[in-house]
Amino acid sequence: MYIPQADLFWGLKRDFVKALMDIAEKETYKKGHFIFHKGDPATDFYILIKGRVRLSIGEAGGVTYTVDHAGEAFGWSSLIDRDVYSATGECLGETILQKFNKNKVHSILEKDPVNGLIFFKRFAGTIGSRLLWSYNMLTASSQAGISPSLGTEQIQKSEAIVEDTT
C-alpha cells in the first residue's frame, strides 16, 4: 500500500503529504502485541500498512472494531487533543504500521492551514464512518434478543418471563 493514497491523505498537496510521511515511523509488531491500552497517554496515531489490529472499548473488550484495510487510520485520540487513548489496540497477527507523533503532525497542520483543514475534513469522515459502524453494531446487538410476533405487529423479547410465586 502506498500510504499517500489512504483516504486520509486523498486530495492533499504532494508536499504536505511528503512532510507527513517524513515524520512517520514504520513499525512492525507480532501477533498479541498491544500497541496501546485504554488510558495510556495518547501520543501517536497510526495508519495500517499490513495486518490486523483489534480496537476494544469497555470491560473485557465489550465493543470491538478490527482495523484490517491498508491505509486505515486509528489512534485518533492523539489528534483531537485527548490526553489518553479511549480504546486498546492489539495486533491480531504480524502488523506493519506507520506511526505519527501528534506534536509533529500538529506542527505540520499549523504551517499549512489549507491542507490542514482538508486533512481534518477527511479525518472527520473517517471518524463518522466508524461511528456509523458502531451505531449499526449496537443496533444489531440490541435487536438480537428480540423477535417479531408473526403478524401481530408487536415485538416479543425472546427471554422467558419467570413469575414470582412467593
Image (cartoon, rainbow, N blue to C red):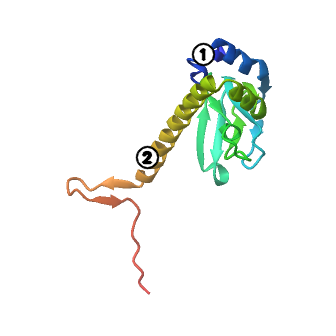
Helix, strand or loop at mark 2: helix
Q: Image height check: is 9 above or below 130?
A: above
Q: Residue furthest left?
A: 151
Q: Residue at x 67, y 45 (%)?
A: 87
Where residue 19 is drawn, which disc sits there? none
Front label number (2 vs 1)? 1
Residue 42 seen in render? yes
Could you classify mark 1 by the number of other residues whose Cα lies within 10 Å: few (under 14), some (14-19), or many (20 or more)?
some
Q: Image height check: is 98 above or below 143?
A: above
Residue 36 image position (x, y, % from top left)? 75, 40
Q: CA distance from mark 2 to mark 1?
A: 32 Å
On screen, residue 152 versus residue 54, left or right, reads left
Give the total of numbered labels. Answer: 2
Q: Label 1, on which residue?
A: 5
Viewer-side residue, 119 vs 156: 119
Residue type beneath disc 2: Ala
Which quadrant: the C terminus?
A: bottom left
Q: Image height check: is 12 above or below 30?
A: above
Residue 95 seen in render? no
Viewer-side residue, 98 vs 19: 19
Dot 2 or dot 1: first in sequence order is: 1
Which quadrant: the N terminus?
A: top right
Q: Residue at x 40, y 66 (%)?
A: 160
Could you classify mark 2 by the number of other residues whose Cα lies within 10 Å: few (under 14), some (14-19), or many (20 or more)?
few
Q: Image height check: is 142 above or below 23?
A: below
Residue 22 image position (x, y, % from top left)? 77, 18
Where residue 140 is drawn, which disc sits there? 2
